[in-house]
Image (cartoon, rainbow, N blue to C red):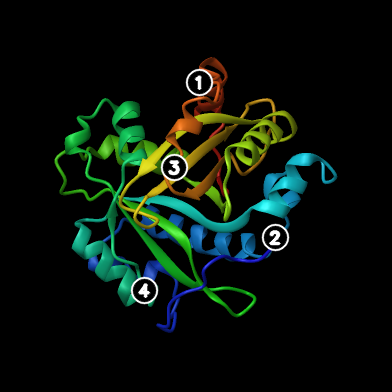
Amino acid sequence: MSVAHPSGTAKERLRPGAGFSGDGAFSGADLRRLDDAIRDARLASTASASTLLAQVAADGEAVALTEAHCVFDHCAVLLFPRTLTAGLRHLERRGLAPLPTVPSTVVRRRLSTRHGLDPAACQVHITRLRLELPDGRRHAAVEVFLFPRDSGGFDRRIEESEAAHGFEQHTAFVVPRPSPPLLERLVTAWRTEAGLLWEGGGHNPHEGGPQGSTVMYFVREHAWPSPRRRFELHCAGDLRDFTARIAEETEAVDRAYADWRRTAHDGPR
Protein backbone atom coordinates (compact mmCIF):
# COMPACT_ATOMS: atom_id res chain seq x y z
CA MET A 1 0.00 0.00 0.00
CA SER A 2 1.48 3.33 -1.02
CA VAL A 3 1.80 6.40 1.18
CA ALA A 4 0.23 9.70 0.21
CA HIS A 5 1.94 13.06 -0.02
CA PRO A 6 5.56 12.38 1.01
CA SER A 7 7.00 15.64 2.27
CA GLY A 8 9.79 17.21 4.23
CA THR A 9 13.52 17.52 3.86
CA ALA A 10 14.91 17.65 7.40
CA LYS A 11 16.94 14.57 8.29
CA GLU A 12 15.20 12.56 10.99
CA ARG A 13 17.31 11.82 14.06
CA LEU A 14 15.06 9.51 16.02
CA ARG A 15 16.43 8.64 19.44
CA PRO A 16 14.89 6.85 22.41
CA GLY A 17 12.33 9.08 24.07
CA ALA A 18 13.84 8.61 27.53
CA GLY A 19 16.86 10.63 26.44
CA PHE A 20 14.74 13.76 26.21
CA SER A 21 12.85 13.57 29.49
CA GLY A 22 15.22 16.08 31.05
CA ASP A 23 13.68 19.04 29.23
CA GLY A 24 10.34 18.44 30.95
CA ALA A 25 8.35 18.96 27.76
CA PHE A 26 6.57 15.59 27.97
CA SER A 27 6.02 12.97 30.65
CA GLY A 28 7.76 9.63 30.36
CA ALA A 29 4.42 7.99 29.48
CA ASP A 30 3.90 10.49 26.65
CA LEU A 31 7.37 9.84 25.28
CA ARG A 32 6.78 6.10 25.24
CA ARG A 33 3.45 6.52 23.46
CA LEU A 34 5.05 8.86 20.93
CA ASP A 35 7.71 6.26 20.17
CA ASP A 36 4.99 3.60 19.85
CA ALA A 37 3.08 5.77 17.36
CA ILE A 38 6.22 6.32 15.28
CA ARG A 39 6.97 2.60 15.13
CA ASP A 40 3.35 1.79 14.32
CA ALA A 41 3.21 4.34 11.48
CA ARG A 42 6.32 2.85 9.89
CA LEU A 43 4.80 -0.62 10.03
CA ALA A 44 1.39 0.53 8.79
CA SER A 45 2.89 2.39 5.83
CA THR A 46 3.74 -0.90 4.09
CA ALA A 47 1.00 -3.13 5.51
CA SER A 48 -1.90 -4.46 3.46
CA ALA A 49 -5.46 -3.32 4.07
CA SER A 50 -6.36 -6.79 5.35
CA THR A 51 -3.56 -6.55 7.93
CA LEU A 52 -4.59 -3.10 9.11
CA LEU A 53 -8.31 -3.89 9.23
CA ALA A 54 -7.89 -7.35 10.78
CA GLN A 55 -9.93 -9.15 11.77
CA VAL A 56 -11.56 -8.98 8.34
CA ALA A 57 -12.03 -11.32 5.38
CA ALA A 58 -9.11 -10.80 2.99
CA ASP A 59 -11.35 -11.39 -0.04
CA GLY A 60 -14.27 -9.23 1.09
CA GLU A 61 -15.52 -5.86 -0.09
CA ALA A 62 -14.07 -3.97 2.89
CA VAL A 63 -10.53 -4.93 1.89
CA ALA A 64 -11.18 -4.50 -1.84
CA LEU A 65 -12.62 -1.00 -1.44
CA THR A 66 -9.90 0.07 0.98
CA GLU A 67 -7.13 -1.20 -1.30
CA ALA A 68 -8.66 0.40 -4.40
CA HIS A 69 -9.79 3.76 -3.03
CA CYS A 70 -7.87 4.51 0.19
CA VAL A 71 -4.24 5.26 1.01
CA PHE A 72 -2.66 4.88 4.43
CA ASP A 73 -2.02 8.36 5.78
CA HIS A 74 -1.10 8.36 9.46
CA CYS A 75 -1.29 6.96 12.95
CA ALA A 76 -2.39 9.36 15.68
CA VAL A 77 -1.67 9.97 19.35
CA LEU A 78 -2.78 12.51 21.97
CA LEU A 79 0.02 14.04 24.09
CA PHE A 80 0.14 16.55 26.95
CA PRO A 81 3.19 18.86 26.65
CA ARG A 82 4.17 21.26 29.42
CA THR A 83 3.40 24.08 26.99
CA LEU A 84 2.70 24.08 23.27
CA THR A 85 6.02 25.82 22.58
CA ALA A 86 7.98 23.35 24.73
CA GLY A 87 6.32 20.39 23.05
CA LEU A 88 7.04 21.61 19.53
CA ARG A 89 10.63 22.46 20.45
CA HIS A 90 11.09 18.93 21.79
CA LEU A 91 9.77 17.40 18.56
CA GLU A 92 12.07 19.63 16.52
CA ARG A 93 15.07 18.58 18.62
CA ARG A 94 14.28 14.97 17.77
CA GLY A 95 14.45 15.81 14.07
CA LEU A 96 10.75 15.07 13.53
CA ALA A 97 10.11 18.39 11.74
CA PRO A 98 6.61 19.08 13.11
CA LEU A 99 4.34 20.87 10.67
CA PRO A 100 2.73 24.18 11.72
CA THR A 101 -0.08 23.54 14.18
CA VAL A 102 -3.76 24.04 13.41
CA PRO A 103 -6.62 24.07 15.93
CA SER A 104 -8.48 20.81 16.46
CA THR A 105 -12.25 20.81 16.16
CA VAL A 106 -13.26 17.15 16.35
CA VAL A 107 -10.87 15.96 19.08
CA ARG A 108 -11.54 19.08 21.12
CA ARG A 109 -15.25 18.28 20.96
CA ARG A 110 -14.66 14.61 21.85
CA LEU A 111 -12.50 15.46 24.86
CA SER A 112 -14.96 18.11 26.03
CA THR A 113 -17.82 15.62 25.88
CA ARG A 114 -15.90 12.76 27.47
CA HIS A 115 -14.56 14.80 30.40
CA GLY A 116 -17.25 17.45 30.85
CA LEU A 117 -15.03 20.34 29.75
CA ASP A 118 -15.94 23.76 28.43
CA PRO A 119 -14.91 23.47 24.74
CA ALA A 120 -13.51 27.00 24.86
CA ALA A 121 -11.04 25.88 27.55
CA CYS A 122 -10.08 22.67 25.75
CA GLN A 123 -7.16 23.97 23.70
CA VAL A 124 -6.11 21.11 21.43
CA HIS A 125 -3.66 21.65 18.57
CA ILE A 126 -2.75 19.35 15.68
CA THR A 127 0.68 18.83 14.17
CA ARG A 128 2.08 16.18 11.86
CA LEU A 129 5.53 14.58 12.10
CA ARG A 130 7.56 13.71 9.02
CA LEU A 131 9.06 10.23 9.11
CA GLU A 132 11.47 8.38 6.89
CA LEU A 133 9.47 5.29 5.95
CA PRO A 134 10.73 1.80 5.05
CA ASP A 135 10.36 2.49 1.31
CA GLY A 136 12.70 5.50 1.59
CA ARG A 137 10.06 8.19 1.26
CA ARG A 138 9.33 10.89 3.81
CA HIS A 139 5.75 11.50 4.83
CA ALA A 140 3.92 13.22 7.68
CA ALA A 141 2.82 9.82 8.95
CA VAL A 142 2.19 10.62 12.63
CA GLU A 143 -0.57 12.98 13.69
CA VAL A 144 -0.10 14.43 17.17
CA PHE A 145 -2.88 16.10 19.13
CA LEU A 146 -1.32 18.44 21.69
CA PHE A 147 -3.30 19.38 24.81
CA PRO A 148 -0.89 21.61 26.79
CA ARG A 149 -0.80 21.23 30.55
CA ASP A 150 -0.87 25.02 30.96
CA SER A 151 -4.24 25.38 29.18
CA GLY A 152 -7.35 26.22 31.18
CA GLY A 153 -9.14 22.91 30.63
CA PHE A 154 -6.23 20.65 31.57
CA ASP A 155 -6.63 18.30 34.52
CA ARG A 156 -4.17 15.58 35.50
CA ARG A 157 -7.02 13.06 35.73
CA ILE A 158 -7.76 13.67 32.04
CA GLU A 159 -4.12 13.02 31.16
CA GLU A 160 -4.06 9.82 33.23
CA SER A 161 -7.26 8.48 31.67
CA GLU A 162 -6.29 9.29 28.09
CA ALA A 163 -2.78 7.89 28.54
CA ALA A 164 -4.17 4.67 30.03
CA HIS A 165 -6.79 4.08 27.34
CA GLY A 166 -5.53 5.82 24.20
CA PHE A 167 -9.02 6.84 23.11
CA GLU A 168 -7.71 9.23 20.42
CA GLN A 169 -5.21 6.80 18.90
CA HIS A 170 -6.26 5.68 15.45
CA THR A 171 -5.12 4.54 12.02
CA ALA A 172 -6.13 6.87 9.19
CA PHE A 173 -6.66 6.50 5.47
CA VAL A 174 -7.01 9.29 2.93
CA VAL A 175 -9.72 8.89 0.30
CA PRO A 176 -8.15 10.77 -2.65
CA ARG A 177 -11.37 11.00 -4.70
CA PRO A 178 -14.25 10.90 -2.23
CA SER A 179 -17.86 10.74 -3.36
CA PRO A 180 -21.01 9.99 -1.36
CA PRO A 181 -21.69 6.68 -3.21
CA LEU A 182 -18.13 5.44 -2.59
CA LEU A 183 -18.13 6.54 1.04
CA GLU A 184 -21.50 4.89 1.61
CA ARG A 185 -20.11 1.58 0.31
CA LEU A 186 -17.00 1.94 2.48
CA VAL A 187 -18.96 2.73 5.64
CA THR A 188 -21.28 -0.23 5.03
CA ALA A 189 -18.46 -2.68 4.27
CA TRP A 190 -16.40 -1.58 7.26
CA ARG A 191 -19.47 -2.03 9.48
CA THR A 192 -20.56 -5.45 8.23
CA GLU A 193 -17.17 -7.06 7.57
CA ALA A 194 -14.82 -5.43 10.10
CA GLY A 195 -17.15 -4.50 12.96
CA LEU A 196 -16.30 -0.80 12.62
CA LEU A 197 -19.02 1.45 14.01
CA TRP A 198 -19.52 4.99 12.74
CA GLU A 199 -18.93 7.21 15.77
CA GLY A 200 -19.04 10.64 14.21
CA GLY A 201 -16.61 13.08 12.72
CA GLY A 202 -16.65 16.60 11.49
CA HIS A 203 -15.37 19.31 9.20
CA ASN A 204 -12.16 21.19 9.98
CA PRO A 205 -11.91 24.44 7.99
CA HIS A 206 -8.25 24.81 9.02
CA GLU A 207 -7.00 21.73 7.13
CA GLY A 208 -7.05 20.50 3.55
CA GLY A 209 -7.23 23.64 1.41
CA PRO A 210 -9.89 26.29 0.84
CA GLN A 211 -12.79 23.89 1.49
CA GLY A 212 -11.20 22.39 4.59
CA SER A 213 -11.38 18.65 5.22
CA THR A 214 -13.85 16.13 6.58
CA VAL A 215 -12.87 13.35 8.98
CA MET A 216 -14.96 10.29 9.74
CA TYR A 217 -14.16 8.17 12.79
CA PHE A 218 -14.95 4.52 13.45
CA VAL A 219 -14.55 2.42 16.59
CA ARG A 220 -14.28 -1.36 16.69
CA GLU A 221 -17.37 -3.15 17.98
CA HIS A 222 -16.65 -5.04 21.20
CA ALA A 223 -17.49 -8.38 19.55
CA TRP A 224 -14.64 -7.92 17.01
CA PRO A 225 -11.45 -8.00 19.12
CA SER A 226 -8.44 -6.41 17.46
CA PRO A 227 -5.42 -4.36 18.59
CA ARG A 228 -6.51 -1.52 16.25
CA ARG A 229 -9.68 -0.15 17.80
CA ARG A 230 -10.19 3.11 15.89
CA PHE A 231 -9.94 4.20 12.25
CA GLU A 232 -10.35 7.43 10.33
CA LEU A 233 -11.32 8.25 6.77
CA HIS A 234 -9.89 11.64 5.80
CA CYS A 235 -11.37 13.47 2.82
CA ALA A 236 -10.65 16.87 1.34
CA GLY A 237 -13.64 19.20 1.23
CA ASP A 238 -16.83 19.73 3.20
CA LEU A 239 -18.84 16.49 3.30
CA ARG A 240 -21.11 17.32 6.22
CA ASP A 241 -24.22 16.73 4.10
CA PHE A 242 -23.09 13.13 3.65
CA THR A 243 -21.98 12.48 7.24
CA ALA A 244 -25.28 13.85 8.55
CA ARG A 245 -27.06 10.98 6.77
CA ILE A 246 -25.00 8.16 8.31
CA ALA A 247 -27.06 6.17 10.80
CA GLU A 248 -25.69 6.38 14.34
CA GLU A 249 -25.56 3.29 16.55
CA THR A 250 -25.19 5.11 19.84
CA GLU A 251 -25.72 2.11 22.11
CA ALA A 252 -23.22 -0.04 20.19
CA VAL A 253 -20.61 2.75 20.27
CA ASP A 254 -21.16 3.22 24.01
CA ARG A 255 -20.69 -0.53 24.55
CA ALA A 256 -17.49 -0.47 22.50
CA TYR A 257 -16.00 2.25 24.70
CA ALA A 258 -17.21 0.59 27.89
CA ASP A 259 -15.46 -2.60 26.81
CA TRP A 260 -12.35 -0.58 25.93
CA ARG A 261 -12.26 0.81 29.46
CA ARG A 262 -12.58 -2.68 30.95
CA THR A 263 -9.95 -4.30 28.78
CA ALA A 264 -7.44 -1.48 28.24
CA HIS A 265 -4.20 -3.00 27.01
CA ASP A 266 -1.01 -1.96 25.29
CA GLY A 267 -0.66 -1.83 21.51
CA PRO A 268 -1.72 0.29 18.53
CA ARG A 269 -5.32 1.53 18.43
Give the mark nearer the N terminus: 2 vs 1.
2
Q: CA distance from mark 1 to mark 4?
A: 37 Å
The residue singled out by tag 1 in the image is: 254
Pointer 4 residue: 97
Question: What's under tag 3, amino acid-wise?
Answer: Glu
Residue 167 location in percent, x, y? 45, 38
Between 251 and 255, the one lying in front of the other is 251
Disc 3 vs disc 2: Cβ atoms closer than 8 Å? no
117 relative to 145, above or below: above
Q: Check contact, mark 1 vs mark 3: CB within 8 A.
A: no
Seen in the image, is 158 located left or right of residue 4?
left
Q: Reply above or below: 206 against 255.
A: below
Amino acid type at image mark 2: Ala
**Residue on which the image places disc 2:** 47
Tell me the residue that label 3 is attached to.
Answer: 168
Q: Where does residue 193 sit, x and y in percent of width and height?
A: 75, 33
Q: Which quadrant of the figure contains the N terminus?
A: bottom right
Residue at point 45%, 31% (across, down): 241
**Is residue 245 visible in this depiction of the protein?**
yes
Q: Which mark is first along the chain, 2 or 3?
A: 2
Counting labels gives: 4
